[in-house]
Image (cartoon, grey):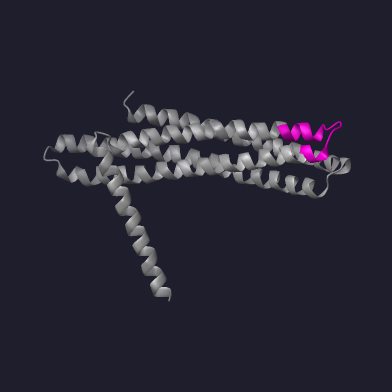
Amino acid sequence: MKKLLIVQVILILAACQTAQKAYYSAWETVGVEKRDILVDRVEDAKESQEDAQQQFSSALDEFSQLINFDGGEFQSVYEQLKDQYEASEDSAEAVTNRIDKVESVAEALFDEWQEELEAYTNTTLKRDSQMKLKETQRNYKSLVSAMRKAESKMAPVLSALKDNVLYLKHNLNASAIGALQGEFSGIKKEINQLVSEMNTAISESNKFISSIQGE
């Protein structure tokens, strides 16, 4: 049974790799190279991080309004915070998916680039291309490191927001809101750190795009 499962996983991975190759090949037939796809995906990842910054900041604003609650329907307050949490969760998922896609095409690009170095007959051009490959890989490593670091800051914030939403769900009263006031400073600090790390990642995205486009 265990061997069968391993075989199934291998077949799924092989099918995914085949599908990816077909995908990139289809774009190449219309003049779109892996390098172009990588730039587009880095742009997409950057945009998802910008969206996430705005969403987590909106969640913080909603939390701020919650702890300063001065009357109204408790249910409405809960629903608004719940909506902000769910929207933040969606934004975090989008960021992760976009980074995964960046890594996928980058791996394919670098593998192809490395393989095609062997096709050179001109040693000077080969050496120059090899140097550019290593430089691009270094820049890419810095980019992904910054993206993943920013991504890692989202989970603690989501966890804290979820805890507060759950607490409020089962304690819809003024004393519950008072109890959550002590949570605000910690969440604010974590969201500010998240926004800061995403600014760094966005800056790295711009630098990488400029470097790969030769600007």
Location of the N terminus by quadrant is bottom left
Q: Residue 161, can we see it?
A: yes
Main SS, magenta region, reads helix
Residue drawn at x 34%, y 63% is 11
Let me know if residue 153 is in the magenta part.
no
Residue 103 position in % (x across, y down): 40, 44
Is there any visible trace of residue 130 in the rendered image? no
Above or below: residue 112 compared with residue 12:
above
What residue occupies the far left of the structure in this picture?
121
Looking at the image, which residue is at 83% across and 44% down? 172
Front residue of 185 and 6:
6
152 or 40: which is nearer to us? 40
In the image, residue 129 lies at what x, y percent? Answer: 23, 36
Q: Write the start and end of the magenta stretch as one range.
A: 62-77
Q: Residue furthest right?
A: 175
Q: Judge whether residue 76 is colored magenta.
A: yes
Residue 19 x %, y %: 32, 51
Would you say 196 lies left or right of 161 here?
A: left
In the rendered image, which quarter contains the C terminus?
A: top left
